[in-house]
Image (cartoon, helix red, strand yellow):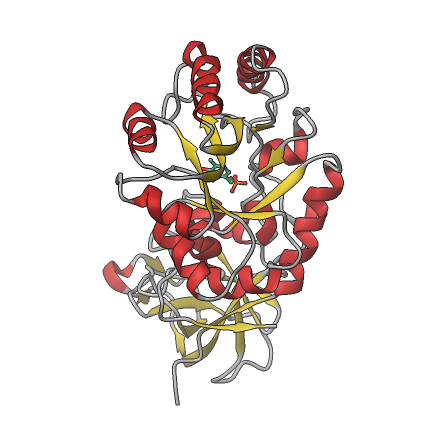
Amino acid sequence: MARPLKKTVSLSAIKHNYHVAKKLHPKSKAFAVVKANAYGHGAVAVAKYLDSTVDAFAVAAIEEALELRKAGVESPIMLLEGVFEAEEWSLCEQYGLWSAVENESQINAFFMANVQIEKLFVKVDIGMHRLGVDPGEAPNLVEQLNHSKRVGEVLLMSHFSCADNLSSNTTSEQLAVFNQVSSLCPEVSASVANSAAVLKWDIPEGGWIRPGIMLYGISPFDGITGEQLGLQVAMKFTSEIISLRVIQKGDKVGYAGSFEAQKEERIATIAVGYGDGYPRNAINGTPVLVNGVVCTLAGRVSMDMITVNVTHVPDITLGSRVELWGDLLPVEEVASLASTIGYELVTRMTSRPKIQYS
Ligand SMILES: Cc1ncc(COP(=O)(O)O)c(C=O)c1O
């Protein structure tokens, strides 16, 4: 027997969500962003399933790309952060990888390496100040790379810092900076949009979009769920009740006794904890579905267990089914009660919950 904890991933939901992104921007090609183990959904399984559907995949670093190539994934794969070491350029050539270039050391190493790369994306810093060359340097760099004759196509790329905030002017301002650079690089395609920009901003059409979180049915926006955006939730994180007890008024539950019963209550212990990726800072009152009924976390999250108030749920037994997040309980809602975002909850899950694909 094993702990009854699992994540069930719907691959067809991820494909559906990819098509949602494509339909919003029919003139653009679309990367499927599968970095960080496809945001916790299993990069190899997701990429193999989508291999004949997507225009290309995007990952953070070469290790992630090579894992996919070794599993037989054939679509183009792009390195969003570029190479970390000069030797990686020859692997890019060997495995047909595309790459961002964003700093002098990557660019010098490219010019030193005697390689031919199909597509390079010159990343421009339009105000996030995390990666990218200055806007003023980009047109010259595009020209130099084109002149080298060692790149099949040179493109421009950037990333917004506030696209998830629909009431901020920052995205329009950053887009104006990008458009100015673009206008100095005629005929050069562009890639600027993450999920938030794909879903809600007026972005240049015709280049490459880069949806990540939306592929998994999770919203990039505060207070809006993936489902409300027309997405299908891909991951269901489930477990079971492993112990049950009735406690009396004044009894305390869990480490530090942070939940105190106000009357006689029924408490269920569930096999999941922070050692599996359930957030330790989820507060008392965080929703948990037991037999489909909304219950609430009662007491501190332990490494392997949580305790939940199930007083109002009929027909509870050991083995009753629990949804921690999924299509009936949005991960965004759990995340906000743990002072984080859906992105973090799915990407930081540990290897303990078994994955099943449906
Ligand atoms: C450069 C880049 N593009 C696209 C994405 C996908 O973003 P999202 O998951 O918000 O769609 C990311 C994710 O962090 C990224 O770093």
Question: Residue at left 27%, top 28%?
Answer: 105
Q: Is residue 24 above or below residue 55?
A: above
Left or right, 255 with respect to 202, comes to: left
User: From where the camera sits, is residue 286 visible?
Assistant: no
Left or right, 342 with respect to 183, comes to: left
What is the x, y in percent for residue 72? Answer: 49, 65
Q: Nearer the viewer, residue 265 or 357?
A: 357
Question: Which of the 4 image quarters holds residue 243?
Answer: bottom left
The quadrant of the picture occupied by the C terminus is bottom right
What is the x, y in percent for residue 280? Answer: 33, 55
Question: Which of the 4 image quarters holds residue 248?
Answer: bottom left
Question: Residue at left 24%, top 59%?
Answer: 256
Numbered disc total: 0
Q: Nearer the viewer, residue 9 or 77?
A: 77
Question: Residue at left 62%, top 46%?
Answer: 225
Left or right, 40 with respect to 104, comes to: right
What is the x, y in percent for residue 302? Answer: 30, 64
Q: Nearer the viewer, residue 201 or 111?
A: 111
Left or right, 153 with respect to 138, comes to: right
Q: Is residue 355 above or below residue 282?
A: below
Farthest residue to the left: give it.
Answer: 256
Question: Residue at left 54%, top 77%?
Answer: 321
What is the x, y in percent for residue 309? Answer: 46, 67
Question: Which of the 4 image quarters holds residue 223?
Answer: top right
The quadrant of the picture occupied by the N terminus is bottom left
User: From where the camera sits, is residue 211 visible?
Assistant: yes
